[in-house]
Amino acid sequence: MTIKAKILCLVAAFALLAVIITALSLKTMGDYNRIIADYRHNAENAFRGERLNRLVATNVIEIRGIYLSQSRDEELSQAVRVSQRAIELEAFLNAWPQSAGDLPELALVREKSRQLVNGGQYLAKITRERGRFVAQDIGDKPEYRASREALQVRIDTMVSGFDAKLASSQAQLKKFEEKRQIQFLMTAASGILILLGGSLWIAIDAIAAPLARVRESMVRISEGAYDTEIPAASRGEIGELWTALGILKSRAAEAERLSREQLQEEHKLRELVLD
């Protein structure tokens, strides 16, 4: 393999490392966005769960306010507030988006919360039409009170579930960041070591060492050691140098042979002249 080809292979290795790091970066971004979206969804659900808890508690308190009214005007005013709280709770439930990954308790809590909304609207209507005492007789029935208490328990359970999912998302995000840091470090370190090793191999084995052997052979030939062994012709720049050096050695040896023959002829001529 020629030096040029080896350098091109090294460049290709650099490009491959860049592609690997880019692919890992893109995958990291995709996974990170997915985890962040899940984290945000769980955080929003936890916040909505807490707010639903407050809205339900406020709705129940407003209903109790009807029972504690001291006059007709007060109970009518309280009935208006109950209707407003029911409308607010209904709007909140309608604005809460549903997702396939939501807790199964959420659907049941929605249903029971809407029953509370309908119950509040009904009690407000009864208060306006028949007074607070009739509304209290209806609202204080054991089944209604048990239903409201069960709703509070379900909401608390749901909020705890959302908090647990949020904590799980936080742990997953932290683990993901640590894992990706290790992957990036290992990929970068491995790539650098491989490329550094390849660069040293090309510099030493493919360039420096062969050139040193060529230089030594040239020095020996220049000193007249025409028996210096020239490696067989090979491909590549170093092979071309050896070929050129072999030609140089042959011509230098031939020139020296001719020079010796000429000296011998001159020596014979001088001897003939002297004789």
Image (cartoon, rainbow, N blue to C red):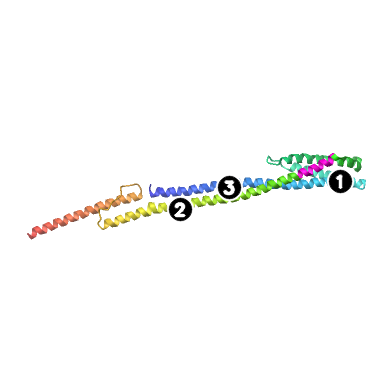
Residue 217 as seen in the image, left or right of residue 91: left
Disc 2 secondary structure class: helix
Residue 82 as seen in the image, left or right of residue 22: right
The amino acid on which the numbered mark 3 sits, given as a three-letter code, is Thr
| Marks 2 and 3, the one that precedes in the sequence | 3
The amino acid on which the numbered mark 1 sits, given as a three-letter code, is Arg
> For the residue carrying disc 2, how many other residues have a C-alpha within 10 Å: few (<14), some (14-19), or many (20+)?
few
Q: Residue furthest bottom?
A: 274
Name the residue at 44% across, 52% down: 197
126, 35: nearer the viewer: 35
Name the residue at 38% across, 52% down: 205
| Marks 2 and 1, the one that precedes in the sequence | 1
Q: Quadrant of the C terminus?
A: bottom left
Spatial CA distance of label 2 from label 1 is 78 Å
Name the residue at 54% across, 46% down: 23
Residue 224 as seen in the image, left or right of residue 128: left
Of badges 1 and 3, the one in the foreground is 1
Disc 2 target residue:
196
The amino acid on which the numbered mark 2 sits, given as a three-letter code, is Leu
Residue 161 as seen in the image, left or right of residue 207: right
Disc 3 target residue:
28
Q: Residue furthest left?
A: 275
Spatial CA distance of label 1 from label 3 is 53 Å
> For the residue carrying disc 3, how many other residues have a C-alpha within 10 Å: few (<14), some (14-19), or many (20+)?
some
Q: How many marks?
A: 3
The magenta stretch is: 143-155
Disc 1 target residue:
64
